[in-house]
């Protein structure tokens, strides 16, 4: 059996887990979602409701009035933003309980950055950009779950300068874009998301190079050991960003992301 299939099959939890998440992500595919359907989905889960309300009242969204109910959040923020917040909140335990404690933070930073950059560049819908940034590394969860010990080795190889996909191939005979793409297929995620999951390290191979480049750029900008010289100039060109602006852009993104992280932790 293909190694990627084997790995994904071995982590039963991740396949069974994302009930709420998959339902919510799939609601994205329907242009007209019933507000009540979404509201019910959240209210069914009490801790999710509490966290959601804390978040929508946070500085990140900057509403002057207090939001006291999910239905109020829905009408003020809109359906798609609420869906995005649900996913970010609901996926936190699954992401942060695994070996790589930084994965959830990295995902939130990428999500906030993609939302921000798509707002500036107008090359992608901001809400789609948020969720794409959030799920781009979802395949890493499979690798962590399969073996935390082995993933630690991958991370130290990366710290020593190895390419992440090559290091993962070395230790797992697969990598996080393959496991992520298989999850996306099993969860029947929208095509844009599965494409970004599969090609976020190689946007040029994608049939959707522009959104993939946007996610790639933000992915690099939010790295803790960010090095401007590592940024591919072609991506900047594709997105229409000047190299001289990237330090500034990075600061703005990290500031925004911190607001979101502060309210979710
Ligand atoms: Fe990645
Ligand atoms: Fe990433």
Image: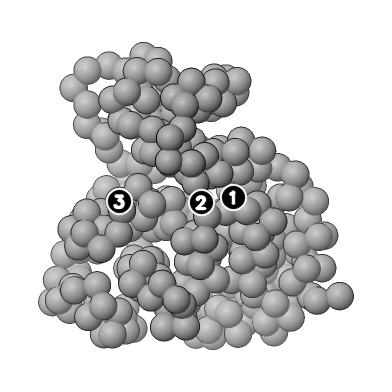
Counting other residues with Cα less than 10 Å from the Cα at mark 3, is it few (<14), some (14-19), or many (20 or more)? many
Percent of width and height locating residue 20:
61, 35
Question: Would you say the residues marked 3 and 1 are in contact, meaning their CB atoms lie under 8 Å apart?
Answer: no
Counting other residues with Cα less than 10 Å from the Cα at mark 1, is it few (<14), some (14-19), or many (20 or more)? many
Quadrant for the N terminus, please: bottom right
Above or below — where is 47 with respect to 194? above
Q: Look at mark 3 in the image and give the residue it sits on.
A: 126
Percent of width and height locating residue 50:
48, 21
Tag nearer the camera, 3 or 2? 3
Q: Looking at the image, which residue is at 19% across and 69% down?
A: 247
Upstream in sequence: badge 2 or badge 1: 1
Upstream in sequence: badge 3 or badge 1: 1
Q: CA distance from mark 3 to mark 1?
A: 23 Å
Question: Would you say the residues marked 2 and 1 are in contact, meaning their CB atoms lie under 8 Å apart?
Answer: yes
Q: Look at mark 1 in the image and give the residue it sits on.
A: 95
Percent of width and height locating residue 79:
38, 33
Quadrant for the C terminus, please: top left
In the visual, does 128 lie left or right of 170? Answer: left
Q: Secondary structure at mark 3?
A: helix
Above or below — where is 132 with respect to 213? above
Above or below — where is 177 with respect to 141? below
Considering depth in this image, is 105 or 199 the residue closer to the camera? 199
- As drawn, the label of residue 104 is 2
Counting other residues with Cα less than 10 Å from the Cα at mark 2, is it few (<14), some (14-19), or many (20 or more)? many
In the visual, does 250 lie left or right of 110? Answer: left
Percent of width and height locating residue 212:
40, 70
Considering depth in this image, is 146 or 16 the residue closer to the camera? 16
How many tags in the picture? 3
């Amino acid at each position: 059996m293909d190694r990627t299939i084997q790995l994904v099959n071995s982590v039963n939890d991740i396949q069974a887990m994302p009930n709420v998440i998959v339902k919510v992500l799939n609601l994205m595919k329907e242009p007209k979602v019933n507000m009540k359907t979404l509201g019910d989905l959240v209210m069914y889960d009490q801790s999710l409701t509490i966290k959601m309300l804390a978040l929508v009242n946070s500085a990140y969204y900057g509403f002057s009035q207090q939001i006291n109910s999910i239905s109020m959040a829905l009408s003020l923020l809109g359906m798609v933003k609420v869906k995005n917040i649900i996913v970010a909140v609901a996926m936190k335990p699954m992401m942060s309980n695994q070996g790589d404690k930084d994965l959830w933070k990295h995902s939130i930073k990428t999500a906030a950055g993609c939302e921000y950059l798509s707002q500036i560049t107008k090359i992608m819908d901001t809400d789609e950009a948020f969720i794409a940034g959030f799920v781009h590394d979802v395949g890493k969860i499979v690798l962590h779950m399969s073996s935390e010990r082995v993933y630690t080795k991958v991370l130290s190889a990366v710290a020593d300068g190895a390419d992440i996909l090559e290091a993962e191939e070395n230790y797992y005979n697969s990598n996080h874009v393959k496991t992520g793409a298989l999850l996306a297929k099993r969860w029947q995620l929208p095509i844009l998301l599965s494409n970004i999951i599969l090609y976020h390290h190689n946007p040029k191979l994608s049939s959707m190079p522009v959104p993939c480049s946007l996610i790639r750029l933000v992915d690099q900008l939010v790295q803790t050991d960010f090095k401007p010289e590592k940024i591919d100039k072609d991506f900047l060109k594709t997105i229409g960003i000047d190299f001289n602006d990237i330090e500034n852009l990075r600061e703005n993104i990290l500031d925004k992301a911190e607001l979101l992280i502060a309210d979710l932790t």
